[in-house]
Image (cartoon, rainbow, N blue to C red):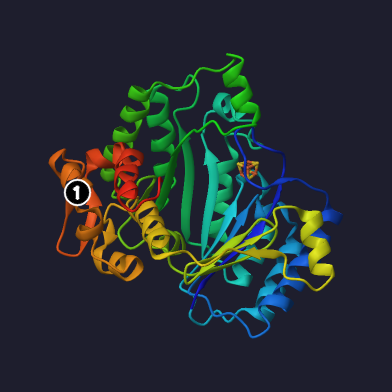
Amino acid sequence: MASLYIHIPFCVRKCGYCDFYSGAAGDADMERYLNALEREFDLRARHGLAPETIFIGGGTPTRLGAAQLRRLGAILGRHVDRSRCVEFTCEINPVTLTPEKADALAAMGVNRASFGVQSFDPRYLAGLDRAHEAGAAPRALAIARDAGIARLNVDLMFALPGQTLAEFESDLTQALALGTEHVSLYALTYEDDTPLSRRLKDGTVTPATPELEEAMFELAGRVTARAGLERYEVSNYARPGAECAHNLVYWTCGDWHGFGAGAHGMIGGVVQRNVADFAAYERDIGKGLPPCAIDNPMSPAERAETLLLMGLRLTRGVELARFRRFAGADFTTVCGGPAGRLVELGLLEFTPTHVRATPRGLIVLDSVILELAMALGYPA
Ligand code: SF4
């Protein structure tokens, strides 16, 4: 019943802030990639998979052409039993979606589309080196709906260099006006060795102040609540019942398989990492070798730390019974000291079944997790 993630590492062009395993590619590269991906499924899914959730991410999966998406659907059709699948998401860069591609996605079973919009303001799209223009997003959402893909998410970024609170509110209002049931809102981060981090170093861009970033975070909660969406994870907001079931697997440290170059999976606390290099991935697969490294099984403390790291991002927090199962000890036994101090500071609270960050705790979540993780003996 483990979930399934499939990585498509191709993009129209590289965004200035991105450090994911992805890059531009031609048609022939994408065909070769599908050949390798098919062989990976032949090798690693010989007995079939029956996931509850499927997520095709990237990269830009819709960088593939309509015929290539149909071929991907056929590969999955041979290896994946979808009878138990409740959610099948595909990430979409708005500029790449055509009606033919949307039909191919719907035919393979995709019922949820996640759009990387980032901003509706052309100045900020240009500043992020995004490959789409502002009008592409509404068109792409309409194409997905016309194809019968009804569950829609919009990703936006905030704290962009020079962005004001009012401009972020305008982006958010435009996203909600599209009738999306889910929004993911990410503060821009400056990852090492990206064009954007180099612009930061040479002073060409100025980052948002922490105060402005915090004001945007708080504004997001108010504006989404008015539209009937609730924050259920630090960066994610949904109408009740429209939470992303696949990402909930990650946030609760469930089990999932990862396929494709650069994908990773985790089954029972054992992480499997596929090589993040198309040539090496293709070479290993060609030799009939699984294209992945398998980590040593996590210790109970490592699993518990990962559960805190991921689960405290959820507004409902970490289930105490699950923590006990992972750590082999009660939360209060292991983390009682720092947890008590965080409760006194108003950053952490307990319910009968969960421990969770308070709204103030979510704003300084990294520090909250660090305090708790140190009690487990591992710096977060
Ligand atoms: S579209 Fe996504 S994966 Fe591709 S370069 Fe941009 S941020 Fe990275």
338 or 118: which is nearer to us? 338
| Residue type highlighted by circle 1 | Gly
Residue at x 69% of width, y 81% of height: 78
Locate residue 177, reporting x and y percent. Answer: 40, 43
Which image quadrant shows ligand 1?
top right
Determine if the C-beta at disc 1 is less than 8 A from ligand 1.
no
Using the rendered image of the protein, determine whether residue 54 is visible from the camera's viewpoint: no
Q: How many labels does the image show?
A: 1
Residue at x 59% of width, y 60% of height: 264
Locate residue 331, reporting x and y percent. Answer: 24, 60
Q: Name the residue under label 1.
A: 337
> Looking at the picture, does residue 95 appear above or below residue 322?
above
- Left or right: 299, with 141 as reference point: left
Using the rendered image of the protein, determine whether residue 34 is visible from the camera's viewpoint: yes
Locate residue 380, reporting x and y percent. Answer: 41, 46
Locate residue 283, reporting x and y percent. Answer: 83, 62
Residue at x 28% of width, y 56% of height: 317
Tag 1, which secondary structure? helix
15 or 200: which is nearer to us? 200
